[in-house]
Image: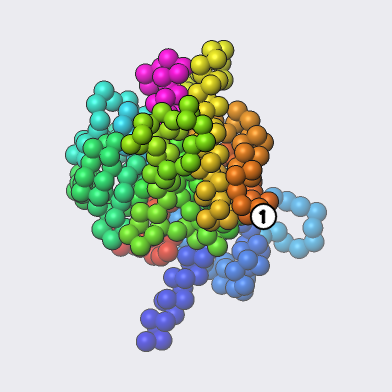
Amino acid sequence: MVERAADGVRQRNLSTVLRLIHLEGPQSRSQLTSRTGLNRSTVAALAGELVELGLAQERAPVETNRVGRPSPVVSVHPGVTAVAVNPEVDAVTSAAVGLGGQVVTRERVELDSVVGPEQTAELTRSVISRWHDHELDGVPPVGIGLAVPGLVRAADGLVRLAPHLEWRDAPVRDLVQSATGLPVVIGNDASLGAVAEHRFGAGRGVDDLVYLNGGASGIGGGLVVAGHAVTGAGGYAGEFGQNRPGITHAADRRGGSGAGVLEDEVSRARLLEAVGLQAADEPRLAAAIAAASDHVVDAEVDRQRRILATALANAVNVLNPSVAILGGFLATLAERDLDGLVSAVVEQAMPGVADDLEVRVAALGEDRLLIGAAEAAFAALLADPLVVQTR
């Protein structure tokens, strides 16, 4: 019993140190001692064990003029990776992501037709096989994270509905696990993006935030309340794209009398149509909008910004976040005039609720969903670094 309790303490301490260097970057042993409250010899032993497990590395400290022997610096091992996969209606994007949220390599495969669950599994197997010798240095990833634009049941990872991908009750997690032989975690893409921005991006250090993501499959979102991601009873929280914002001007409505949900009105497809493109990744669409001199593009951007401001005001009234983060094409809309968007939100929010609100664009760019998916794949390892001994 005593030995089991001691093992539990050791596991928690290893987890604490690994999380610190994962989330906050390299730390000297003295910094880890201060942050964890553990004594120096315990921190030295924990760091040494993480090195032996292949999860961390230590390097000599930078020489300083301070009195005393400088403390070695502990950082994550760059060879520890997870593979992240984001299937969309127009492409499947994959990345190898290291501990610390560093994207090692990424690949976007554009498709002529909507990808299915089985094809997603095969594409994932294929990319891991191709990356094995070079990008992954022959070291298998610790797991796979799937960021899916749809409703993912938290209990068993079943994709209940991904309407734009035409998936219903799809066991894609199990398909990918069977194809690769690796542990697989799956989640809603926007909810995972919220986690990534909270840990490594525009929401770092923010306890209460709302995140909205605009992609090829519409608009999704994620919530962080009191520092914790909120997923809801079944894992479906954050479907902001299905809300119906009030549209003040009838001329702004495009979805028809029977529609009017946010993602019908604020739409990547409508922006692509305005700039004359059939398909584009985020940077190309943003560049096309910035370069456009056609009043039709300006009018469409302004129309979508008005409706987006109303939707954000509704979210702010309900959740009272300190920061709202916009990713994907929503970031492009916001960057047209960020201060103007904030003013429009504040004007429509209840007095006081949005007084200190900040609206920020996602800092992780195109990598946000992939980093979020990798975080899901790393979760078991971060909770118990000793699991690497059993793999």
176 horizontally vs 353: left or right: left
Q: Work out whether residue 168 or residue 136 is closer to the camera in this orientation and state it.
A: 168
Q: Work out whether residue 144 or residue 352 is closer to the camera in this orientation and state it.
A: 352
Does 355 sit above or below residue 17? above
Does 281 sit above or below residue 182? above
Q: Position of residue 60 (x, y in %)?
A: 63, 53
Return the residue at label 1: 352
300 horizontally vs 86: left or right: right
Instruction: State the image quarter where residue 189 is shown.
Output: top left
Residue at point 76%, 63% (across, down): 68
Residue at point 47%, 65% (across, down): 15
Quadrant location of the C terminus in the rendered image: bottom left
Residue at point 70%, 59% (across, down): 70
Q: Position of residue 254 (x, y in %)?
A: 41, 28
Residue type highlighted by circle 1: Gly
Residue at point 61%, 64% (across, down): 32
